[in-house]
Amino acid sequence: MKISNFILSLPLIAASSVMSQQKPNILWVTIEDTSPQFIGCYGNKDARTPVIDKLAAEGVRFTNAFSTGTVCSPSRSAIITGVKTYQMGTGNHRSNYPIPSEIKGFPYYMQQAGYYTTNNAKTDYNVGNVGQFTKQAWDECSKTAGWWNRKPGQPFFAVFNFENSHQSRTMTESYDWYRKNVFDNLSPKEQISDNAFEMPPFYLNSPEMRKQFARVYNSIKLTDNNIGDLLKRLDADKLTDSTIIVFYADHGEGMPRGKTNGINFGYRVPFIIWFPEMYKNLSPWGVGGVVTDELVDFEDLAPTVIALAGGKVPDYMKGRKLLGKQRSEPATHLVLSADRSDNGIDMVRSVTNGRYMYSRNFLPFMPEARYIRYMEIGEIKQQMRKDLADHKLNELQAGLFNERPAEFLFDIANDIWETNNLAADPKYASVLKTMRKQLDDEVLASRDVMFLPEYQIGLLSENTTAYEYRLDDKKYPIKEIYDAAGLSGFRTKDVAKKQVQLLKSTNDIVRFWAIVGLRSQNAATQTTCKKAIEKAMITASAIAYDTFGSGSAKENLIKFIGSDNNDLALMTVNYLLYVGDKKPFVDAINLAHDNKNNGYNVRAACYDFLGSLGLVENNSENKD
């Protein structure tokens, strides 16, 4: 059956052998790396997504759904545990830190309520002991898993993850690979040409860029076909009438400026719930093409489906229950986060109320288009760097490669592509003040553990978990630490003076944030703090070398490039990616890259360093 025929026949009521079943079946359809701007039912007339559009036309479409991270493994950590990554310590992609044994993958609680739970098939949960964790969560987790192996009449919770919209398809694999594996799997009628869509304004509207960006539309089209095939099987098994279908993406679009970045383009996701007739009473919004602006993030998913299954929601899950009799009050705002992605370090905390997106950049010397090896091997990223070098980019487009301000404030209701930062506009001062406070309150209340440098998380994880460590105020005085971190990015002499004073703190994490903050100051301000800076280590050495030309700082940096601690080495190489004169470090970088004892992220960062100097071909190695 053609997909176009299927979408016209999706039944609201069908004869079924499970009409007497009291608990609904639940089918999760997840796709990867997709922003709602590229799906038809969200207003894109160039998109060809009839299956997804049909679900929206008969169900409930959410306009304010957000991932809690902007890259897959942190996002999936929040989904599977029901706990924000900045509480769990799982914000860095990818990491392997332990979590408390009492925190289980949420399908475990659905099993206790009688559900058959399956996952087909992606895990990527970003937790330690992932094999045991995964085994405990699912009755079956494999590429052949599905509802078909449950006991007769047993309700199921089944997840199907489709990868054809993943960044590998839209930008990272070669164009020839994409043609063979995506484009050629679409009929001529389904294929979307290079000139059949509008380009986001932060990309150059050139034939070369359009050729690359067409991959997004065709990859989503193939994904829509994949979803249609799955729903046909559900219908053939006479289960559509007893199954609630939830569709969403794991985070924003897998293209430069989207995935990995703490802005709306990285966080916002398409999210649709489809209710069969027998369970439409569970929808507080109604059914039949309803659109809601209710705020949803991935912390809400686990408690929602556990409650829907009739299970007991554990106390550590603080998200909302969206459906049924236990439904929670709607949220007024959400707090979201973005941290390291592969070899590209970063730290952003964001607040949204659906109208505005406020993002606090704690490492603003890292640009939005920072070096991440998995993106640098993509032809579109290479084209962007070439266009930058050839002075073809306008101010907005070139700005992706510049340092960021400490704060972003975007009116995402009227500026969906986030082109106009309102943080310095006096007319929005009250909005900025409110969202700042909301962020401050959440950081302190949640005791955001990601303010620890990653090497510290690695060390403490040998004896405890970051989740538990953060609760001890003597070990982790979050207020004192956040007071120091909160200065980072504000580029004034008065702030720099405070940061110099904080370098005298007895708390090493406070000192860390003091020097990171000084790294964000301009060169003139750094010069006034030269003596204090020269006494510190990695971050200070990066400043002292780049700003003062310090020979001892250069030697310190070379030493840390070769550190046995991969987190320290990664931090060092990331700093060096953005200094003016990189040549003195080439030999040390080559040694670190060739050291097989170093992890992927260090070697990838070294390759990015060498690629930035034109010493290696960007597309030739270190794919992850």
Image (cartoon, grey):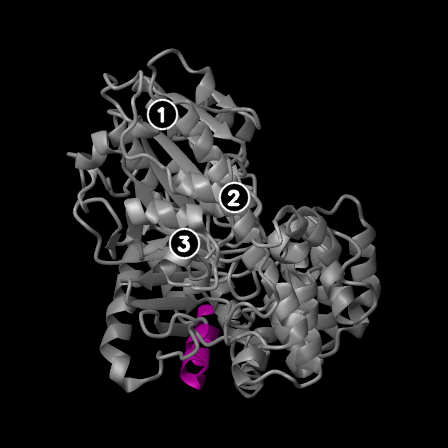
Task: State the predominant SS element of the stretch in magenta.
Answer: helix
Whether residue 321 sits left or right of residue 554 in the image: it is left
Q: Nearer the viewer, residue 455 or 322?
A: 322
Callout 3–callout 1 Cβ contact below 8 Å? no
- Where 544 sits versus 114, above or below? below
Callout 2–callout 3 Cβ contact below 8 Å? no
Mark 3 or mark 1, earlier in chain = 1
Q: Position of residue 550 (x, y in %)?
A: 71, 78
Mark 2 or mark 3, earlier in chain = 2
Numbered circle sitting on residue 269: 3
Would you say residue 422 is visible in this rendering?
Answer: yes
Mark 1 or mark 2, earlier in chain = 2
Instruction: Name the residue beneath numbered marker 2.
Output: 225
The Cα–Cα distance between marks 1 and 2, rounded to whole angstroms, is: 20 Å
Report the amino acid beneath label 1.
Leu
Q: Residues within 10 Å of mark 1 (few under 14, many from 20)?
A: many
Would you say residue 474 is visible in this rendering?
Answer: no
Foreground disc of the pair 2, 3? 2
Q: Position of residue 202 (x, y in %)?
A: 52, 75
Instruction: Name the residue beneath numbered marker 1.
Output: 239
Q: Which residues are magenta?
A: 489-503
